[in-house]
Amino acid sequence: MHTMKRALMAALLAANFVGAAHAQSPEATIRKNLAERIPQLSAIEEVSKTPMPGLWEVRIGSDILYTDAQGNFLIQGALMDLRTKRNLTEDRMDKLMAVDFDALPLKDAFTVVRGNGKRKLAVFQDPNCGYCKRFERDLQKVDNVTIHMFLYPILGADSTEKSRNIWCAKDKGKTWTDWMVRDQLPPEAAGSCDAAALGRNVEFGRKYKISGTPTLIFADGSRVPGALTAAQVEKHLAGAGK
């Protein structure tokens, strides 16, 4: 009798072990069900828990979606923590969009130093971008900063040509400022000039999903798209220096 009881217990334990081994994790379930239910969905890069019980984050590139543990529902929008008054989706996006400042390919940028140059800023700009011109004219008011300027020609062939002329100029910083601030066309570059940096900048921008200009990257890795005012740039520089 005892032998039979032990055999039954062993069989039950083995069955439970097999069942547990075949049970999918919530992450695997979410990936499987969303892929089956939304075939056109791009590849899911990351699935993780959120602070809200039962809610999971699904990351596709730099896009954030939310779902339940079975992948039965899909939510697009901002997740707010009402206790702390924080936008958790925005916080997460800031982390995803951050770029390690030390990893920037500075050899493919030209540098402008103002004042003591202690503060650091990198900017991706297209010479034909109207917002960039507005931003650049306001940026002239910011002092004591080192600006690494990445020419980022994404608005067409003329942007590439102007960027090449600026990159190949003897004084890149002055030629850039003359064009962006004073509307003085850059001189035509020599045919022998190596402007391969422009292509590398575009590749870098695609990798880090820099889709618009200007895009600013501060020393702490924080990234801000859009034409900021001088006061806003000062605020971000102060925050990045803490």
Image: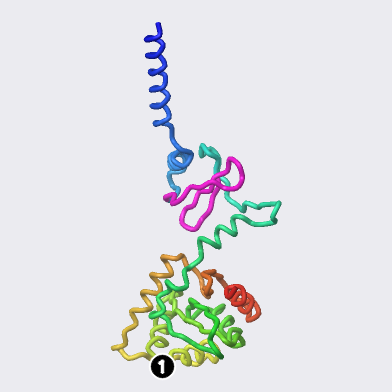
Q: Residue furthest front?
A: 2
| Mark 1 lies on residue | 187
Image coordinates of residue 68 in percent, x first then y, are 55, 40
Question: Compared with residue 21, is residue 214 higher up or lower down, i.e. above or below?
Answer: below
Amino acid carrying mark 1 in the image: Pro
Position of residue 112 measured from the top left corner of the image (x, y, whole percent): 49, 87
Residue at x-position 58% and y-position 40%: 54
**In the rendered image, is residue 236 in sight?**
yes
Q: Residue furthest left?
A: 192
x, y percentage for residue 206?
A: 42, 66
Q: Is residue 57 magenta?
A: yes
Q: Secondary structure at mark 1?
A: loop
* Residue at the image position 48 percent from the left and 68 percent from the top: 99
Rendering quarter of residue 109: bottom left
| Residue 36 or residue 52, whichever sits in front | 52
Crowding at mark 1 (Cα within 10 Å: few <14, some 14-19, many 20+):
few
Tell whether position 76 is magenta. Answer: no
Which segment is the magenta one? Answer: 43-66
